[in-house]
Amino acid sequence: MGTLKSIQMVILSVLFLTCYGVQGQKLLRKVKKQVEDKAAEVMDEGLNGNKQKSEKEDGRTDEYITASGKSKINPHFIDRSNLLFFDNFDNEKPGEFPSKWTQVDGTVENGHFISGNRKDGVVQMVSSRSEIKPTFDKDDYLGESFKIELEHHFWQQGNEAYVIQLFGSRSSRPAYTIYLRGTNVAPGSESLAYMAGKQSPGWFTSQISFNRGNLKVFVNGQQLVNNPDINIREFTHLSLYTLSPGSTRGDGHTKARINYFMIAKEGLPLYDRIVTNGRIVVRDIYFDVDRYDIKPESYPSLDKIVKMMKEHPNMEVTIEGHTDSNGSNESNLTLSENRAGAVKNYMVSKGIKRYRLASKGFGEEKPVSLGNDENAWAMNRRVEFVLHN
């Protein structure tokens, strides 16, 4: 199937370049993007239906075999509109300390990691036990309901572990600790939970959910922990430390590495978020490729914004549209302006006075990720609601 698609694209390329020159190149790029977007759409439908796997650039898939059958990493585990903290290290200078983190122990630096066709900005732990924590004004951001997601690398050798320490308000010592190892998870004082099958070296995705004492841990789509009552109802903050075999080899080849780290505060009211941060970032407002018609699956998120503004009649916001870097700067700027305007018109149609809303497009000018893959593009495609002072 992949070979056939490649042959088709080569034939198209020759025909367009022969017949239409520069204009043909532009049209070909647009056709190619539409084909790729449609392929991604079909793949998404397959993940929800009969399709079995989604292949990554480096050959790995989002499908893993468990004792009870096949499982997949949930790409919607974290609602991006509820993000408290996100770092994929793409904007960092190699060799420097990651700017969104606070040093606790050991030696930590930014770097690049290349595996096959994949190149990532990463944070890497130089010393065997290195500890960092997300930088917040106050260490009281977690509460009683939150989610954590990170992608980390295992070499499957030595005493490797990525350790999430969850703190409470009554002690400087961690109240609960989760060890993520190359073959298992050790939650608190509970017994080890092993992953099914032999685990090869590579990137692993760990997802942690906490809700009023209910703890769940997923690794590569496998649910390894489901504890309905850990006797702790609330946490204040977290830190992350690693146990790495890197220091034992001398060349640093097997350093612990993290590709991205996210924290989401589940259920945080929209009004609290926009007042605290000055803006709300929403990534589940959807449009067709190169169009600004709002898809119906976007309405629930938009209706929440409308509801908040009706509850606070003095609030005024600017709707900012942002695109990824596919396409020209000029077309992306126009597209983002039209999409922001479409969101404004929708909210007006739902009863929000037009004078309370402004709209502006920035195209690809303000990326939040400098990566050149679908994960980065998805982060950059967004609508932001910015509170007027």
Image: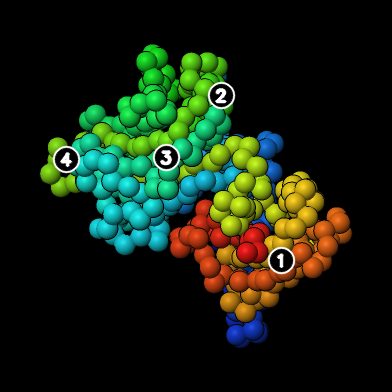
| Residue 187 picture location, percent across and down | 40, 21
| Residue 167 picture location, percent across and down | 40, 30
* Crowd rating for badge 3 (residues with CA inside 10 Å; few <14, some 14–19, many 20+): some
Question: Could you tell me the amino acid type at mark 4?
Answer: Ser
First of labels 2, 3 by sequence position? 3
C-alpha gap between disc 1 and disc 2: 37 Å
Residues 264 and 48: in front is: 264
Q: Is mark 2 on a helix, strand or loop?
A: loop
Q: Name the residue under label 1.
A: 340
Q: How is the image coloured?
A: rainbow
Residue drawn at (56%, 27%) of the image: 211
C-alpha gap between disc 3 and disc 1: 35 Å
Judge left or right: residue 157 versus residue 4.
left
Which image quarter: residue 73? top right
Q: Mark 3 points at which residue?
A: 139
Give residue 247's mark: 4
Judge left or right: residue 300 versus residue 265.
right
Question: Could you tell me the amino acid type at mark 1?
Answer: Ala
Residues 109 and 219: in front is: 109
Which image quarter: residue 28? bottom right
Judge left or right: residue 253 versus residue 343.
left
